[in-house]
Image (cartoon, rainbow, N blue to C red):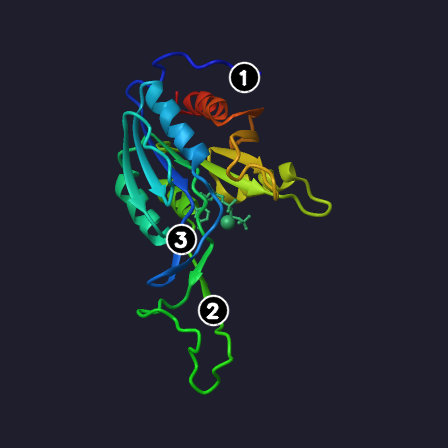
Amino acid sequence: KWETAAPGDYTGWRVLITAGGTREPLDPVRFLGNRSSGKQGYALAARAAARGALVRLISANVSLPTPEGVEIERVESALEMQQAVREDVGWADLVIMAAAVADFRPAAYAENKIKKTHDAADPEAAPMIALERNPDILAGLVADRGEATKPVIVGFAAETGEPGRSVLELGAEKLARKGCDLLVVNEVGAEKTFGQDENTVHILRGDGQPGLDAGPASKDEIADAILNLAIKVMA
Ligand code: CTP
Ligand code: CA
């Protein structure tokens, strides 16, 4: 069991949180997206604000009420999210990247809606959609921070596991690769986590100190567990 939150322990801390899932535009009416509901990121914003923090929430395509006392900025795509994060990172003591950021976006954006018969020469043809890599926002934050200690950076990892490689092994590798201070590893699958109200996570620390397993518990309780560890790293 994790420690309970001390009331007001986040007073004076500036917390920047991303939540939701990016949409990568294909044409004016279509996008590539993912199933992130934004619930865990919103719970983090609500709990940080309730504990006294100044909270800015960069929200991608979430249909949830804005938590009380939280400043919100809405974005759609990964590129928009990166720009919004960059504008606020200098303000923040703590950045929590809870958003599901698309790794790829359509390489070309069609200014007009793509028609079913998009190729006059072959009316039955289906189009190919070429993709290109999006920037890794989290890795960019770690790189830009360099030797500085501020802001503390928290990443999330949704993992399904692979044959012969556990969720925890994949999480530890990702933590080393990303270089963030905490990585919240979330086990996902067809019925796990996405859109659910309960969550189970392993929180790994980048400094090698023991992390924390939390859950199954409500996303508010998971949020408090993450914030409890983050404030230790910040202190
Ligand atoms: N992330 C990001 N920018 C991206 C992709 C991911 O900032 N373009 C952040 C997410 O917000 C999350 C963390 O990186 O905090 C890990 O995301 P995840 O998708 O698990 O990691 P990837 O490095 O994209 O690896 P994978 O191949 O498993 O998708
Ligand atoms: Ca990814």
Report whether 84 appears left or right of 98.
left
Residue 231 on image: x %, y %: 41, 22
Q: Residue shown at 30%/18% (left/top)?
A: 11
Answer yes or no: is residue 228 visible.
Answer: yes
Q: In this view, does 137 lie to the left or right of 124?
A: left
Residue 102: x percent and y percent? 45, 52
The residue tagged 2 is: 129
Residue at the disc numbered 3:
23
The residue shown at (49%, 22%) is 221
Q: Are marks 3 and 1 in contact (CB under 8 Å)?
A: no
Q: Can you give x and y, in whole percent of width and height, for residue 208 in the image?
A: 56, 29
Secondary structure found at label 2: loop
Residue at point 33% right, 63% down? 28
**Mark 3 Cβ inside 8 Å of ligand 1:** no
Which corner quadrant holds the C terminus? Answer: top left
**Could you tell which of marks 1 and 2 lies nearer the N-terminus?**
1
The residue closer to the viewer here, 112 or 154, is 112
Left or right, 163 with reference to 64: right
**Residue for badge 1:** 2
The residue drawn where x is 61% and y is 44% is: 190
Look at discs 3 and 1 and give the one toward the viewer.
Answer: 3
Tell me the CA gap for discs 1 and 2: 46 Å
Mark 3 crowd level (few <14, some 14–19, many ≥20, 10 Å Cα): many
